[in-house]
């Protein structure tokens, strides 16, 4: 099965780690929840998850504030730019371990093409640096 441009998604852990190329998105993102299964009008969530308790949304903080939605966690959004296979083994664990060793929480969302990490906003630069170090060590 091919990916974008006919390329297959990567499954090899060493290549996933060495090629992950973390990219920090601008902005501050929050996790919030609303009843039902539809985002309120005017919101453009970057992630949605339907749960029994309601719809989880990850939205820009300013949009959550404008919609008067509550949240507890302000995050930075990092995308691992390698096209990872959904059945690849070990990438999430390796990334989570590297960040956990530094005392960084990490919420991971897998998209079709990439993995997306939500880390404490105030430690975003540190998280990117740790991921780049992990990639460098994995490429040697």
Image (spheres, rainbow, N blue to C red):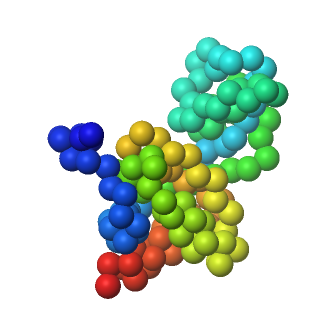
Residue 32: x and y, percent?
Answer: 73, 35
- Image quarter (top left, top right, bottom left or bottom right) of the N terminus: top left
Residue 99: x and y, percent?
Answer: 60, 71
Q: Furthest residue to the left?
A: 5
Q: Can the viewer see residue 25 in this picture?
A: no
For the residue pair 118 and 13, the one nearer the viewer reads as 13
- Image quarter (top left, top right, bottom left or bottom right) of the C terminus: bottom left
Q: Can the viewer see residue 92 in this picture?
A: yes
Left or right: 70, with 122 as reference point = right
The residue sitting at 37% across, 71% down in the picture is: 14
Q: Is residue 121 above or below residue 56?
A: below
Residue 52: x and y, percent?
Answer: 79, 27
Q: Is residue 23 above or below residue 139?
A: above
The residue sitting at 61% across, 44% down in the picture is: 29
Q: Which quadrant of the structure image shows residue 121?
A: bottom right
For the residue pair 5 and 73, the one nearer the viewer reads as 5
Residue 27: x and y, percent?
Answer: 53, 47
The residue sitting at 51% across, 64% down in the picture is: 90
């Amino acid at each position: 099965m091919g990916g974008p441009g006919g390329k297959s998604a990567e499954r090899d852990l060493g290549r996933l780690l060495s090629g992950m190329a973390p990219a920090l998105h601008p902005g501050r993102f929050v996790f919030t929840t609303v009843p039902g299964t539809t985002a309120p009008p005017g919101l453009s969530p970057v992630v949605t998850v339907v749960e029994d308790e309601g719809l989880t949304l990850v939205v820009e903080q300013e949009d959550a504030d404008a919609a008067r939605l509550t949240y507890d966690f302000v995050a930075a959004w990092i995308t691992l730019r390698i096209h990872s296979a959904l059945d690849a083994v070990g990438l999430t664990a390796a990334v989570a371990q590297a960040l956990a060793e530094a005392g960084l929480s990490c919420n991971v969302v897998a998209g079709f093409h990439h993995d997306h990490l939500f880390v404490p906003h105030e430690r975003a630069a540190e998280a990117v640096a740790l991921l780049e170090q992990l990639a460098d060590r994995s490429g040697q």
